[in-house]
């Protein structure tokens, strides 16, 4: 058997690869001190994300327009970045009843790399470009790479740019090599890792925070929530069914038994039940108002309140006015 050719070493100049001066004695520390040092470094992540909020807001607004226009949000990442992206995309359907194909994660190496680290696949720019072949001008592509140079991600972003898609980079490198390929660079500068080069730590945490905020904000702006409550979730187990009843009670002020009955009358549709409770109307009218309002609870309530025979939710006994 012929051995595979050895790859030439590559020196990556990125903050995450540098040695952290505060952790040089890491292997000499007692356990409690070791954990305290890791925790202290972790506390640098949220402030770093805060500095990137203007760029993140621009990415959210762009994604909202893409989804409203029927496009798809694509995530591309390798290693930890790809796993974080895959997790975020997978959790949107149960949380927001997001339709399949609206947010799609692409991981270098495919499904096998989700469970087993396949480190060499991130160097394949052609693979990234090939996986981005389905991207079109109506889409948005988010590339995630701590170093800001991963060839797989670079290939995907280059192909997306050629297709006319909106492109976003999430990195931990202010001087990211592939930043010129994108419209928006969300840079979360988390600095050197506790363990030099181990980007599953602060950089990975930063990516998780960024994608949590990004996807949640997109869903909120699309009207998939009411106040700070989920309204588009689907009850696939007993816990989620109970959560839906609790949400109805929290939003309307009605008792749990009433909420369970109204939810049943709405055939388990949380939005229909919520609009019915808040507007004091039946499931049929609530569903019709939602259909005419793109499924947005606040818009459906405004439609009902403005109709000649609709009831103002503020006048329904036990029902508080919808929050502004």
Image (cartoon, rainbow, N blue to C red):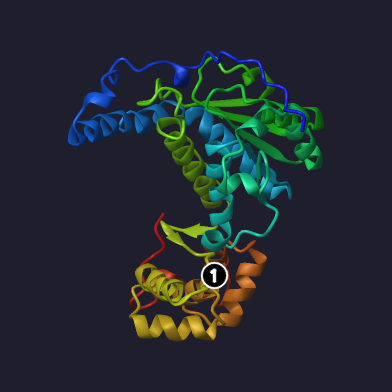
Q: Nearer the viewer, residue 296 or 100?
A: 100
Q: Is residue 138 above or below residue 228?
A: above
Is 77 positioned to the left or the right of 53 in the image? right
Is 181 positioned to the left or the right of 146 in the image? right
The residue singled out by tag 1 in the image is 234
Q: Nearer the viewer, residue 319 or 53?
A: 53
The quarter of the image holding the N terminus is top right
How many marks do you count on the picture? 1
Q: Is residue 221 visible?
A: no
Percent position (x, y) of residue 322? 41, 62
Percent position (x, y) of residue 316? 39, 76
Q: Is residue 218 above or below residue 298?
A: above
Q: Nearer the viewer, residue 134 or 276?
A: 134
Is 315 positioned to the left or the right of 102 in the image? left
Say what secondary structure mark 1 lies in: loop
Percent position (x, y) of residue 21? 31, 15
Q: Nearer the viewer, residue 163 or 118?
A: 118
The quarter of the image holding the C terminus is bottom left
- Mark 1 neighbour density, 10 Å: few (under 14) some (14–19) many (20 or more): some
Q: Name which quarter of the figure residue 42 lies in.
A: top left
Q: Is residue 277 above or below residue 251?
A: below
Most extreme residue toward the front is: 1
Q: Is residue 12 visible?
A: yes
Residue name at image x 67 percent, y 48 percent = 67
Percent position (x, y) of residue 163? 81, 32
Q: Is residue 278 above or below residue 191?
A: below
Residue name at image x 53 percent, y 73 percent = 236
């Amino acid at each position: 058997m012929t051995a595979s050719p050895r790859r030439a070493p590559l020196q990556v100049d990125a903050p995450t690869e540098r040695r952290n001066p505060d952790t040089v004695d890491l292997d000499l520390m007692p356990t409690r001190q070791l954990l305290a040092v890791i925790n202290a470094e972790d506390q640098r992540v949220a402030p770093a994300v805060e500095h990137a909020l203007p760029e993140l807001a621009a990415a959210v607004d762009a994604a909202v327009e893409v989804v409203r226009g029927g496009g798809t949000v694509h995530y591309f990442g390798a290693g930890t970045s790809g796993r974080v992206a895959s997790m975020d995309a997978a959790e949107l359907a149960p949380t927001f009843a997001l339709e399949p194909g609206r947010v799609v994660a692409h991981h270098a190496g495919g499904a096998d790399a989700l469970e087993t680290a396949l480190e060499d696949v991130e160097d394949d720019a052609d693979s990234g470009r090939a996986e981005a072949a389905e991207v079109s001008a109506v889409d948005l592509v988010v590339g995630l790479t701590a170093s800001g140079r991963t060839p797989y991600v670079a290939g995907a972003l280059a192909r997306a740019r050629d297709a006319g898609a909106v492109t976003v980079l999430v990195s931990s490198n202010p001087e990211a090599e592939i930043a010129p390929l994108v419209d928006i660079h969300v840079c979360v500068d988390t600095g050197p890792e506790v363990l030099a080069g181990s980007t599953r730590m602060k950089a990975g945490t930063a990516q998780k925070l960024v994608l949590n905020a990004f996807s949640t904000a997109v869903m909120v702006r699309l009207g998939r929530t009411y106040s700070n409550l989920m309204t588009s979730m689907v009850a696939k187990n007993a816990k989620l069914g109970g959560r839906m009843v609790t949400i109805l009670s929290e939003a309307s002020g009605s008792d749990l038994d009433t909420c369970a009955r109204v939810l049943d009358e709405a055939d388990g549709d949380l939005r229909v039940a919520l609009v019915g409770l808040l507007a004091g109307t039946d499931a049929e009218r609530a569903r019709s108002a939602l259909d005419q309002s793109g499924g947005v609870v606040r818009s459906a309530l405004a439609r009902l309140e403005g109709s000649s025979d609709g009831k103002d939710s503020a006048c329904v006994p036990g029902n508080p006015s919808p929050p502004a």
